[in-house]
Image (spheres, grey):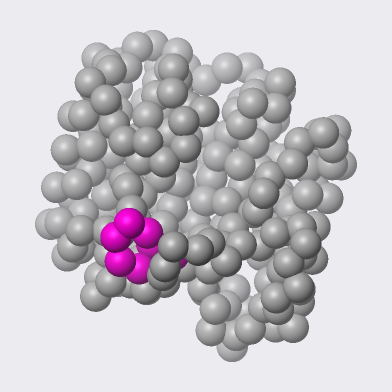
């Protein structure tokens, strides 16, 4: 998982560095995939997903020939894969400039992500982990906003998935599964289409004996290219 996370970071870093006005989604994907392979990864079970402003609402779709322009957003979600183990991450990148609302909504996302880390303890119900995420969102004045989960179990995966099968075991509002030491999760703090701006950050988190460990280290925060 840790080696896969390093592959994820290499691929994400390459994709971010390749993102600029005039670059196409396809060109960014090519750089991303090359970096993934050269960093020691093999083909992942899923993605990478690379899409810009006009297709932000299309989950799990691949790149197109669209070229980025000033003011665009670029969505990246990908995973390195080593020995079939996956460590996904996701980022939202801004081209040229970020909307004025971005920093406030990014802070909500980051605070909600930290709340999830605080809630991932052995014996905690999955539903209570989700509640920790949603409570931060609610306090920010976004109580109308709901997600079907704030993350899911991840690790071994084969195409067409990085979740280990054709079912997503999610940190959902109604799940009575319990967190156990040794579990690994793709934690997503996703606020898209809120009416107050868009932001997305996700990382792979492993619950070890000393608490949760964020394996993917690509810088978060507001990134403008």
The quadrant of the picture occupied by the C terminus is top left
Residue farthest front in this picture = 166
Residue 155's place in the image compared with 123, above or below, is above
For residue 209, side relative to residue 165 (left or right): right
Can residue 157 be seen in the rendering of this structure? yes
Could you say where residue 204 lies in the image, as x and y percent from the top left?
A: 48, 63
Tell me which residue sits at (49%, 57%) in the image: 203
Using the rendered view, name the quadrant where residue 145 is placed.
Answer: top right
Which region is colored magenta? 157-163
Q: Which residue lies furthest to the top in this view?
A: 70
In this rendering, the answer to whether 140 lies above or below 220 is above
**Residue 6 magenta:** no
User: What main secondary structure does the magenta stretch of the protein show?
Assistant: loop
Regarding residue 4, the answer to whether it shows in the image is no
Count of marks placed on residues: 0
Residue 171 percent location from the top left of the image? 66, 62
Residue at the farthest bottom position: 209
Image position of 51 with respect to 217: above or below: above
Q: Which of 175 and 196 is in front in this view?
A: 175
Residue 113 vs residue 150, the one in the foreground: 150
Residue at left 28%, top 39%? Answer: 15
Image x and y of residue 60, in percent: 41, 41
- Residue 132 or residue 160, whichever sits in front: 160
Identify the residue at horizontal 44%, vertical 62% (top origin). Answer: 166
Q: In which quarter of the image is the N terminus?
A: bottom left
**At which x and y percent is residue 52?**
40, 24
* Residue drawn at 43 percent across, 33 percent down: 75
- The question of residue 161 being in magenta is answered with yes
Left-right relation of 213 to 47:
right
């Amino acid at each position: 998982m840790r080696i896969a996370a390093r592959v994820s970071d290499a691929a994400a870093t390459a994709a971010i560095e390749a993102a600029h006005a005039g670059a196409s989604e396809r060109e960014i994907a090519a750089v991303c995939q090359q970096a993934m392979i050269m960093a020691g990864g093999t083909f992942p079970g899923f993605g990478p997903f690379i899409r810009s402003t006009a297709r932000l609402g299309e989950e799990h779709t691949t790149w197109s020939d669209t070229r980025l322009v000033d003011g665009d957003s670029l969505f990246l979600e990908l995973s390195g894969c080593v020995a079939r183990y996956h460590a996904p991450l996701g980022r939202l990148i801004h081209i040229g400039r970020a909307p004025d609302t971005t920093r406030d909504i990014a802070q909500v996302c980051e605070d909600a992500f930290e709340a999830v880390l605080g809630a991932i303890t052995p014996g905690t119900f999955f539903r209570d982990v989700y509640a920790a995420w949603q409570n931060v969102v609610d306090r920010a004045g976004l109580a109308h906003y709901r997600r079907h989960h704030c993350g899911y179990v991840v690790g071994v995966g084969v195409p067409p998935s990085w979740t280990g099968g054709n079912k997503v075991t999610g940190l959902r509002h109604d799940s009575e599964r319990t967190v156990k030491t040794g579990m690994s999760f793709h934690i997503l703090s996703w606020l898209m289409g809120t009416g107050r701006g868009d932001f997305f950050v996700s990382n792979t988190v492993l619950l070890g004996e000393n608490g949760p460990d964020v394996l993917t280290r690509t810088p978060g925060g507001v990134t403008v290219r």
